[in-house]
Image (cartoon, rainbow, N blue to C red):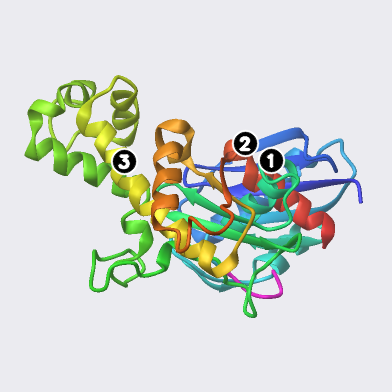
Amino acid sequence: MGLTIGVDIGGTKIAAGVVDEEGHILETHTVPTPPTADAIVDAICAAVEGAGKGHEIEAVGIGAAGYVDDKRATVLFAPNIHWRHEPLKDKVEQRVGLPVVVENDANAAAWGEYKFGAGQGHEDVICITLGTGLGGGIIIGNKLRRGRFGVAAEFGHIRVVPDGLLCGCGSQGCWEQYASGRALVRYARQRANATPENAEILLALGDGTIEGIEGKHISAAARQGDPVAVDSFRELARWAGAGLADLASLFDPSAFIVGGGVSDEGELVLDPIRKSFRRWLIGGQWRPHAQVLAAQLGNKAGLVGAADLARQG
């Protein structure tokens, strides 16, 4: 199969890209993300049609945040869009006249990294995305593993603290409440409130208030050595690495790939994640260790991965 289109549904924009067999993006078209579920379907179709002009397109892959059924056709549940058993495949196919594959966005990003990014050369890879929340994907034996009902790898909602922090999913103590962009901001605000003298750089980058601290401020302050910012990254990394150690016990991959916005800080976060992973890996002194690698494709991973999954049908 030749050219396919991948679609990434973001909070502010929907991006569609024409992707070739080597994972290169040849053309992109973006549209604003509208506020209603029905309008989002319209926007997806507009983005696909805009990107595909002048190209012979053979299929479309859509990365959607939420639970996608085992047939890669229906969004069973989307937390940020009011989709409940939404027949997205059928709706888009009828409009664009092309075969459509729907996949969870974290799965699509994991596949993109495995096929064209940091996972190249590995057969068994676990991906996690440290963004606003925490997502993931499982590739074992060169295959994306989705589970019987299509909703595997929701790593962010593994409960790591019984009766812990309330999660947006309705449960308590989920991993993403301790290892995510939201968690990083919470750590920084708590520490800055307790010891403002150790957060002078951090506070100066914002509006000077605890409530004004945002993720971008923590990253910039950590690069300047701000004690609170650095310690906040270490706390996030401690939880992330411990979680990877648990996943190693489950899947025994040769590599973990860490993506998402938090991972953009590179070794600032990856080095302490590796240390935490080694600290909590059961039998670590006697067994081989998986590599912990930085994702390479950035925010293009989901689009590229969805396009390639559409190519496979």
Residue 240 visible at all: yes
Magenta region: which residues?
A: 68-72
Mark 2: secondary structure: loop
Identity of the residue drawn at 64% across and 43% down: 301
Q: Which residue is mark 2?
A: 296
Apparent side of residue 78 relative to residue 253 in the rendered image (left or right): left
Residue 60 covered by magenta stretch: no
Please say if 27 is above or below 153. above
- The reply to whether callout 1 and callout 3 are in contact (CB within 8 Å) is no
Q: Which residue is mark 1?
A: 117
Q: Nearer the viewer, mark 1 or mark 3?
A: 3
Please say if 177 is above or below 153. above
Of 168 and 135, which appears nearest the observer? 135
The quarter holding residue 197 reads top left
Residue 64 visible at all: no
* Residue at the extreme bottom of the image, as rendered: 148
Q: Position of residue 28 (x, y in %)?
A: 70, 35
Marks 3 and 2, how far apart at CA: 22 Å
Q: Position of residue 43 (x, y in %)?
A: 61, 49
- The reply to whether callout 2 and callout 1 are in contact (CB within 8 Å) is yes
Identity of the residue drawn at 69% across and 69% down: 72
Residue 70 covered by magenta stretch: yes
Q: Residues within 10 Å of mark 3 (few under 14, many from 20)?
A: many
Q: Which residue is mark 3?
A: 234
The quarter holding residue 173 reads bottom left
